[in-house]
Image (tube, rainbow, N blue to C red):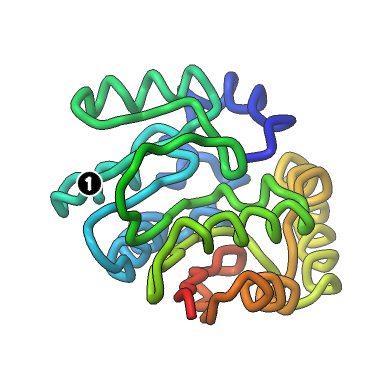
Amino acid sequence: MGREFVNIFDGWAESYDASVSGKDPEYRDVFEGYDSILNEVVNRISGTSIIEFGTGTGNLTALLVEKDLSVIGFEPNEKMREMTAKRFPDKEILDGDLLQFEIGEGKIDTIVSSFVFHHLTDEEKGKALKLYSELLEHNGKIVFADTAFITEEAKLDQIKKERARNFHNVADDLEREYYTTIPILTELFEEAGFQAHFSKMNDYVWIMDATKK
């Protein structure tokens, strides 16, 4: 996770779950079908040994735990890390992000995240995917849920739409953080040795389902 955005979540940690549940009108479209999105991530997992990046308040973690999967979670925001650790005291919730993390010995089957990958620039995304390729064996998987757009023009149109609705926080997020396009993501996954498929879940979010070749 891009550490430059970590402090944003200090003020959002307590209200994050209200936002994803649709109680914040400004973010309602972003998180439309939130539960289905998380379940879709879990449904696409291969194997039982999982890394989760950006555990946040632990919503995806909870589904992984329900499936009795072996989970190592990384979260760079201290407040959110503490919240998840309290929910799951027997799980490893470590200080780490998409690029800076440490794991012990052992096989990793799938790497997952939800609403996290956009914190990296496109260059950093490429570096991260190549790092994950080294961790995963043949047919290992990456399953990410995150906001992306078909084209840069589509992204700009969405920003205009949110400004017109006076949803300036969402528009500011789209302009400030590193939301990218499906063609760029496709190229980055391929360069890192993955075959990726993308499934649109709402006006913002796509499931990125990639298998190491």
State the image quarter where residue 36 is shown. bottom left
- The answer to whether any part of residue 17 appears in the image is yes
Measuring 79% from the left and 56% from the top, which residue is drawn there? 123
- Residue 112's place in the image compared with 17, above or below, is below
- Residue 108's place in the image compared with 104, above or below, is below
Nearer to me, 91 or 80: 91
State the image quarter where residue 103 is shown. top left
Tag 1: amino acid: Ser
144 left or right, relative to 11: left
Q: Which residue is mark 1?
A: 70
- Percent from the top left, x then y, of residue 75? 48, 32
- Percent from the top left, x then y, of residue 63? 24, 50
Measuring 22% from the left and 57% from the top, which residue is drawn there? 48
The N terminus lies in quadrant: top right
Looking at the image, the residue that sits furthest to the front is: 105
- The answer to whether any part of residue 165 appears in the image is no
Nearer to me, 51 or 157: 51
- Residue 70's place in the image compared with 141, above or below, is above
167 left or right, relative to 130: right
